[in-house]
Image (tube, grey):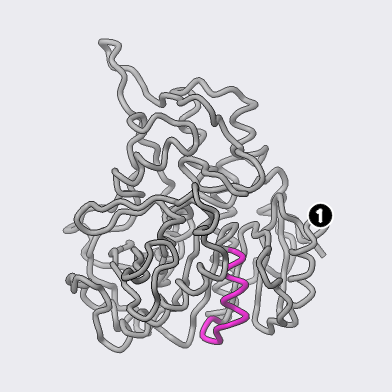
Amino acid sequence: MPVGAAIGGSVASASPGPAGSSRTASGRTGSGQSVPVRPRLPAPTGPYPVGTVDLHLIDPSRPDPVAGPGHYRELMTSVWYPARDVWRYPRAPWMAPAALRAFLPSGGFDPDSVLTPITAGHQGAPVRRMGQRSPVVMFSHGAHDHRSDTTIVVQELASHGYVVVTVDHTYDAYSEFPGGRLTVPQLDDPSTALVPPDFARDIRFVLDRVEDLAAGRNPDTDRKQLPAGLGDAVDLDRIGMFGWSKGATATALVLTEDPRVRAGLSFDGPMETNPPLTTDVDRPFMLMTAVYPRATQPSVAEFWSHLTGWRLNVQADGAVHGSYTDTQALIPQLVDAVGMSDEELQAWIGTLDPARAVRIQQAYPLAFFDLHLRHRGHLLDGPSPAFPEVKFIS
């Protein structure tokens, strides 16, 4: 059963990091007073500045499976996109501070010891005119997690001209709603636990709202002002999706259920759901595996056997479950502050060098969506000398 992993998300089977007693991640001032640490995210490499906007969505047709009678499914989402005139707009935090404070103890960190990283996304900046509409990529997070856990990948895609939509799966996410209302994963009652089909239903609903955007309608429940040009940027004929862990399994489900999504990417998804994934998928799908390889995970091997179109499985040497997420870049920045041992750090990030992991996160998802939504690029033709740690699994 996945458990929380601070600064990067949920992992499967067992906690990878220094869970148990709370650690304080802090530096010292000249007077010896502790100060919180603010980790940094790597900058995206694309040619375009990045904008972002949060959307508050409610599905009036779907009673919430956790909140109970009279409540409907309510989600926080973020839209990331290529932007212009960004100097006028503040950069967005990785997580809302209150959500981060609730999230940190899930990985054994003091809630006051870490400040939220600052992203490359400028809040509410106008959309850059690209000459044509931009491909859309949806993202689904891991269990007991949050929609920011692959921000490195998300802002990389946006900097290369994609519109990326990230979704908090409420009650399996640390999420803050307008007005400061906080929701956290519901771990005490197994009967209310969200499963991959719940995640998939969330994504399909949000896809409907993306269609609203493209049609010039504002889907935000509170009718907040949208960035100029956002609706005109969305290309509904070029939609992809990726997810991590449980969100990767949800990605597979969406590909089996929704023809709007033309390509799917899994970050180490276990592909475990009920009923099992036995429907053939004729659209492109790529696995980036780590602790759930086909060789030892029957559900992944079974899903692979039903991929009847383009398919590819790559795996980075030394990767662990969170190595394709922000964990790989953020956790090493806390080592000195918390006194983390080499063994504890390796439990978090494996033996894959953090800087190399960032390059892999920036290169391979972009190459996948470029190939299948833009029909360009050669990185996925075979092993690359630029990425010797990335193996192609036949």
Helix, strand or loop at label 1? It is: loop
The answer to whether residue 7 is above or below residue 56 is above
Residue at point 71% right, 60% down? 314
> From the viewer's perspective, is 319 left or right of 90?
right
Task: State which quadrant residue 207 falls in.
Answer: bottom left
Pick whichever, 183 or 175, lies toward us. Answer: 183
Task: State which quadrant residue 134 falls in.
Answer: bottom left
In the current view of this chain or complex, which residue is farthest to the front? 69
> From the viewer's perspective, is 99 left or right of 350?
left
> From the viewer's perspective, is 15 left or right of 295?
left
Amino acid type at mark 1: Thr
Pick whichever, 383 or 155, lies toward us. Answer: 155
Residue at point 75% right, 56% down? 293
| Residue 36 locus on image (x, y percent) | 33, 28
In the current view of this chain or complex, which residue is farthest to the top? 31
Exactly how many numbered labels are in the figure?
1
The answer to whether residue 200 is above or below residue 186 is below
Residue at point 41% right, 24% down? 24
| Residue 210 locus on image (x, y percent) | 37, 79
- Residue highlighted by disc 1: 296
Q: Residues within 10 Å of mark 1 (few under 14, many from 20)?
A: few
The quadrant in which the C terminus is found is bottom right
> Which secondary structure is most common in the magenta stretch?
helix
The answer to whether residue 312 is above or below residue 95 is below
**Was residue 22 drawn as part of the magenta stretch in this picture?**
no
> From the viewer's perspective, is 369 left or right of 206?
right
Pick whichever, 105 or 123, lies toward us. Answer: 105
Pick whichever, 134 or 190, lies toward us. Answer: 190
| Residue 311 locus on image (x, y percent) | 72, 74
**Was residue 260 drawn as part of the magenta stretch in this picture?**
yes
Magenta stretch?
Answer: 248-261
